Amino acid sequence: HYTHWFQPLTGGTAEKHDAFIEHDGKGGVMEKFTGKLLVQQEPDASSFPNGGIRNTFEARGYSAWDISSPVFIINNTLCIPTIFISYTGESLDFKTPLLRALNAVDKAATGVARYFDKNVNHVVSYLGWEQEYFLVDEALYAARPDLVMTGRTLMGHESAKNQQLEDHYFGAIPSRVEAFMLDLEIACHKLGIPARTRHNEVAPNQFELAPIYEETNLANDHNLLLMDVISEVARRHNFRVLLHEKPFSGINGSGKHNNWSL
């Protein structure tokens, strides 16, 4: 199968899988994949949030191949990174505004740079993100309806020990967590995510993964891809991962720091 992998206004990603088959004109089917299917598709956009720019009955939406981000394979499915726009060109995703912003920064920065060097023709933005997260044992997670329903705590008392001594930060990684991290890094490298750094964060059972910096659009795709992969790997190790920015009261939340340059 293949899918146009896009980023609607939900904070995650979306995909619709299609098989590589077409009618052969003789009552059967054959494997076929054309350039037209690679470049553009027309998924239903009526049930995706749109920021109030369209009426709900306007179902048409278009996904178009983003050639600046490489395709990847997950579970035997070819994933094609795409933008997602309306029939009249309004963006229905987060990738389209990012690409437009990168283009605007390129033009403005190139104009400034040429005051100093006439040979400058292009300015590229690079991004290094940091993904912080909490790990919770699956049995404890299942015992908390608020975690199950919202991905954060809504009730309860503070723990006996929080982060007062700050002894968890950069401390020795527990063996069970280290096994999870190793599995996660292998999964990341298979998908081209250049995961490099791992360590304990400030709060109890809070950790961080950081990759080598990349071109901004690709780095953004890799962060969204990681958010899917990390949840899948955590379940294999009987963990649940919390990506909410403030899942517990009284201790640090999880930031997603973005270190960027031109």
Image (spheres, grey):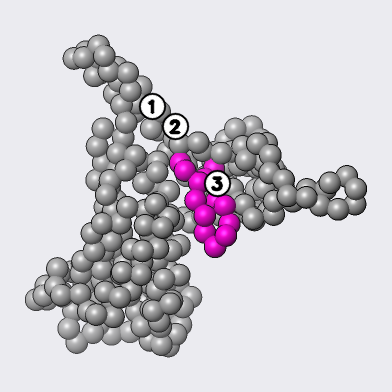
- Asked if 196 appears above or below 179 in the picture, the reply is above
**Marker disc for residue 104:** 1
- Report the mark closest to the observer, 1 or 3: 3
Whether tag 3 and tag 2 are in contact, CB under 8 A, the answer is: no
The answer to whether residue 255 is seen in the rendering is no
- Asked if 108 appears above or below 33 in the picture, the reply is above
Specify the quadrant that holds the N terminus: bottom right
- Report the mark closest to the observer, 3 or 2: 3
Label 2 amino acid?
Arg
Residue 177 placement (x, y as % from top left): 28, 76
* Disc 3 crowd, CA 10 A, few/some/many (<14, 14-19, 20+): many
Range of residues picked out in magenta: 69-82
Viewer-proximal residue among 47 and 83: 83
Q: Label 3 to label 2, Cα distance in Å?
A: 19 Å
Residue 9 placement (x, y as % from top left): 51, 50
Mark with earlier residue (1, 3): 3
Quadrant of the rendered image containing residue 164? bottom left
Is residue 192 found left or right of 78 in the rendered image? left
Whether tag 2 and tag 1 are in contact, CB under 8 A, the answer is: yes
* Residue at mark 3: 80
* Residue at mark 2: 100
Task: Report helix, strand or loop for mark 3.
Answer: strand
Viewer-proximal residue among 1 and 243: 1
